[in-house]
Amino acid sequence: MSLIELKHAVKEYTTGDITMRALDDLSLQVRQGEVIVILGESGSGKSTLLNIMGGLDVLTDGEILLEGKPYTNFKDGEMSKLRRQKFGFIFQAYNLLPLLTIYENIIAPLLLDQKHVQRKVVEAVSESLGIREQLDKFPNQLSGGQQQRAAIVRALINHPKVIFADEPTGNLDKETGRQVMDCLIDAVKGEDATLVMVTHNEKLASCADRVIRMENGKVDFSQGV
């Protein structure tokens, strides 16, 4: 059974009299434990695909399933719960709250679900990503690479099934980006989680088990999936 499956997925956006089809009858399967890189030019549909799989947007038509169960038509509360409990997210802009310490940022998803927080668990994961000494600092006291590592810890702390990453190294220099990607891959493999990452950086494809190339809202099967 696939972990995530899209069946004839269609996503349209309408502005005035103009309708744009961002996903065009797309069918795709994601398996447990895969590292998938989604490549494509701007406007190809890659970010829309990521947002649909992560429950950040909804389909116009078609179906999406997690472990064989559809979540196509979940209400807002159901979708929020699914995202907190099953998914982790890493964005280009880090999305750390500036008035919270790094530790408080990391445990925020757990507190939303009223889960018990053990600092030693947070410290252990942070240690593996090299930011244990930064936990009591605020985001503006960290470098860009350290902030993105904190965002990775936050995404992993709830032991999600899937990590969705949107250009996670886009704001980092080449060397820092490479180090962060190495940490991300190691952390995801250590959790036996699945990573789905959107990027326009062809060089990041080398870290993937599978590369999906998007063009005009479709998967370019001519280049393999």
Image (cartoon, helix red, strand yellow):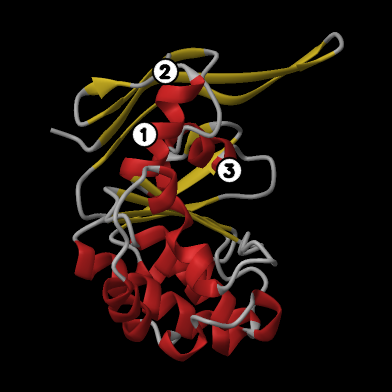
What residue is shown at x 58% (from left), y 43% (from top)? 47
First in residue order: circle 1 vs circle 3: 3
Q: Secondary structure at mark 2?
A: loop
Q: Disc 1 and disc 2: Cα gap in Å?
A: 9 Å
Residue 166's tag is none
Q: Secondary structure at mark 1?
A: helix
On the picture, is 111 further left or further right than 136? left
Q: Which residue is mark 2?
A: 74
Q: Which residue is mark 1?
A: 82
Q: Of the residues shown, which amino acid type is indicated by label 2?
A: Phe
Q: Which residue is mark 3?
A: 47
Location of residue 197 in the rendering, given as x and y in whole percent from the top left corner: 45, 55
Q: Disc 3 and disc 2: Cα gap in Å?
A: 20 Å
Q: Of the residues shown, which amino acid type is indicated by label 1?
A: Leu
Dividing the image into 4 quarters, which one contains the N terminus? Answer: top left
Identity of the residue furthest to the left in this view? 1
On the picture, is 103 further left or further right than 44? left
Q: Of the residues shown, which amino acid type is indicated by label 3?
A: Ser
Identity of the residue furthest to the top in this view? 17
Q: Is residue 206 visible?
A: yes
Q: Is residue 139 above or below residue 48?
A: below
Question: How packed is label 1: few (under 14 Cα within 10 Å), some, or many (20 or more)?
Answer: some
